[in-house]
Amino acid sequence: MIGYPYIWVLAAGLIIVLFLLIALVSPVTIQGEMRRDGENDDIEINFKALFGLLRYKLKIRSIDFSGKAIRLHEHLMGTSIGMSSKDEKHDEIDTHRVMAGIEKYKRAAALTYNLSHWAKQTLAKIRLEEWKWSTAVGTGDAMWTAMATGALWSVKTTTLGVLSQFVKLRAEPRVEVQPVYAQACFRTEWNCIAKIGLGNAIMAGLHLLVRLRNAKEGVQAWRSLLFKA
């Protein structure tokens, strides 16, 4: 009778360990969808982990090209173990912001030991489960439509070629470019599903933390770089 409480404690411990092991091998799923038909845009990115207990969705409802800037209307929704959150904002991307992002990346690479090698190792653990990209293009002129079709084929095949060098392709990519000779139009639809094991994602984060700690200026400098105005 005395040993019964210890048996229950041991059983509870085994259940917790089993759950942690299952959680570590469970996939983190990232699904991206993009549609553009003329001036109408619809971009959505879904993130799911821990069997759906963690969910985040980023939806871009509109993209406006105005002068030298791109204006985005974003909608972010998240669910974390029953807790929900929503956020909606307007964002703007201009030349200054792009150049600032490039400079931040260069600085981050300088602060982190062999950052490119870490990125390649992390990407190698990602499995690409689905890749569909179909486009219909027309310029109103047969010759220019044919040239635009060839250019799009080149862009899509080059993108797949580069992508296959970094991630594992688990499904046959489906790529299509359809010329429309009768009228000027542009329609494109893209779908992608990528997965990485939660354990691999955690280990990648730990490896990055170790590299940051080994950097000359430390983690604090890297953090200030990311969040400075």
Image (cartoon, helix red, strand yellow):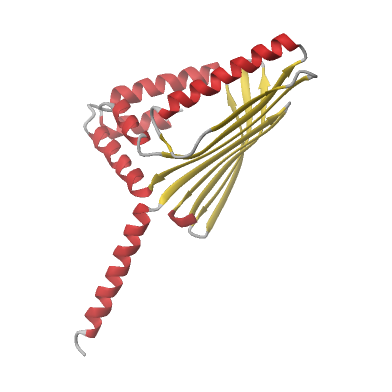
Most extreme residue toward the right is 182
Most extreme residue toward the top is 143
- The residue lying at 55 percent from left, 17 percent from top is 154
Query: Is residue 111 shown left or right of residue 40?
Result: left
- The residue lying at 27 percent from left, 33 percent from top is 212
Picture coordinates of residue 123 (x, y %)? 37, 34
Picture coordinates of residue 81 (x, y %)? 48, 59
Image position of 163 with respect to 14: above or below: above
The N terminus, quarter of image: bottom left
Which one is nearer the viewer's eye here, 115 or 128?
128
- The residue lying at 32 percent from left, 24 percent from top is 109
Picture coordinates of residue 118 (x, y %)? 30, 31
Most extreme residue toward the left is 2
Image position of 35 with respect to 109: above or below: below
Q: Quadrant of residue 10?
A: bottom left
Most extreme residue toward the bottom is 1
Image position of 46 with respect to 154: above or below: below
